[in-house]
Image (cartoon, rainbow, N blue to C red):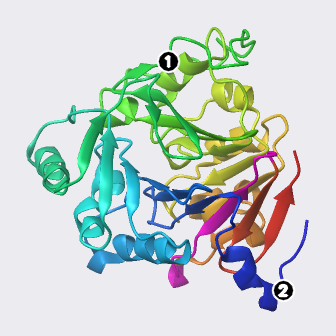
Amino acid sequence: MRAIFPGLILAALLPGAKTLDVYFIDVEGGQATLMVSPSGQSMLVDTGWAGFNNRDADRIAAAAKLAGVKQIDYLVITHFHADHVGGVPQLAAKLPIKHYVDHGPSRETGANADALYSAYQKSWGSGQHIAVKPGDKIPVKGLDVQVLSADGAVIKTPLKGAGKPNPLCGKDAPKAEDKTENARSTGTLITFGKFRLIDLGDLTWNKEQELVCPNNLVGTVDVYLTTHHATDASGPATIVHALQPRVAIMNNGATKGGTPPAWQVVRSSPGIQDIWQVHYAVGGGKDNNADEQFIANPDQANDQGKWIKLSAEATGDVSVTNSRNGFSKTYKR
């Protein structure tokens, strides 16, 4: 572990020439995760909310500028809820978006759902739309981006090196069927050399277990972006403990996600070293939050929209930095 002194903070936050750089942007309990390949190509997963005086689009654009990104090569929309797709029109007005990737048409209907999906479609402009299914790959140069789940389906064939029986199966009872867009989330595994990061959007409990039961089709990962903002509608130990992440990133809001049961599942996962949080979870208390140095926005009353940056090397080594205080920690493979 190393502390970054003020004079070195800027160097730690600038994009690396030979690393995969990932910015977990604060969109107040939604998702906006910007990935920059060593090739220079970019992939953004979700865009946060609409409104709020362009708050989320501005935060994404600021992170993109810092990363040297002038366009979004692949925008992956995990599912059609306002905290994930709402910000697309505002972002498209700020940055060119080349490819729009999703699971296909929204499966929710009604005035609000229809308006949300329509606004998203109108934003495509001159960009190319790509509907993906499990097993597809998103061709970001320099990365292997595997689609694990989409439109309510998951991969059926184990990834390379995976497929072993999961002894945890059956210990987490199934929940009621989720018929919302959450269960149709487009989930991805991002691989760079020996480094692996998983992002399942808001995929819910039963669908997550399909990925690892009766056999673990995914294998293990280095970094786990908590599913569904770490709510207890997602993230059973059956999958989290099977993935065995070394580091978890929690894209929660101050009062959204980061629930104590979900936090404890991650905290007790075999091999976990640290949990980094976009926000202090107000409902979690001291026992269900990381130490202050690992939290980008610890003060709900004075939220500054700080983000967390991850830099991964092909060796599997990864460093994580808190933009609020410059604190950084490196995890050797």
Residue at x-position 62% and y-position 56%: 38
Q: What residue type is labelled 2?
A: Phe
Task: Report the residue that reaches farthest toward the left.
Answer: 111
Question: Could you tell me which quadrant the N terminus lies in?
Answer: bottom right
Side of 120 where 23 appears, left or right: right
Residue 132 lies, in percent from the top left, at 35, 30
Side of 158 where 301 appears, left or right: left
Boundaries of the magenta span: 301-316
Residue 230 lies, in percent from the top left, at 57, 46
Within 10 Å of the Cα at label 2, are there few (<14), some (14-19), or many (20+) other Cα atoms? few
Foreground pick, 267 / 151? 151
Q: Which amino acid does label 1 sit on?
A: Ile
Task: Tell me the element at label 2.
Answer: loop
Report how far apart the C-alphas of labels 2 and 1 lie in the structure: 45 Å
Residue 271 lies, in percent from the top left, at 85, 38
Check the image and report above or below for 156 versus 304: above
Quarter-of-image position of residue 11: bottom right
Residue at x-position 25% and y-position 42%: 129
Q: Work out whether residue 109 can be spotted.
A: yes
Residue at x-position 51% and y-position 76%: 305
Q: Mark 1 points at which residue?
A: 155
Q: Mark 2 points at which residue?
A: 5
Check the image and report above or below for 301 versus 186: below
Q: Which of pointers 2 and 1 lies earlier in the amino acid sequence?
A: 2
Quarter-of-image position of residue 251: bottom right
Residue 61 magenta = no
Residue at x-position 83% and y-position 34%: 270
Task: Report the residue that reaches farthest toward the bottom.
Answer: 7
Residue 302 magenta = yes
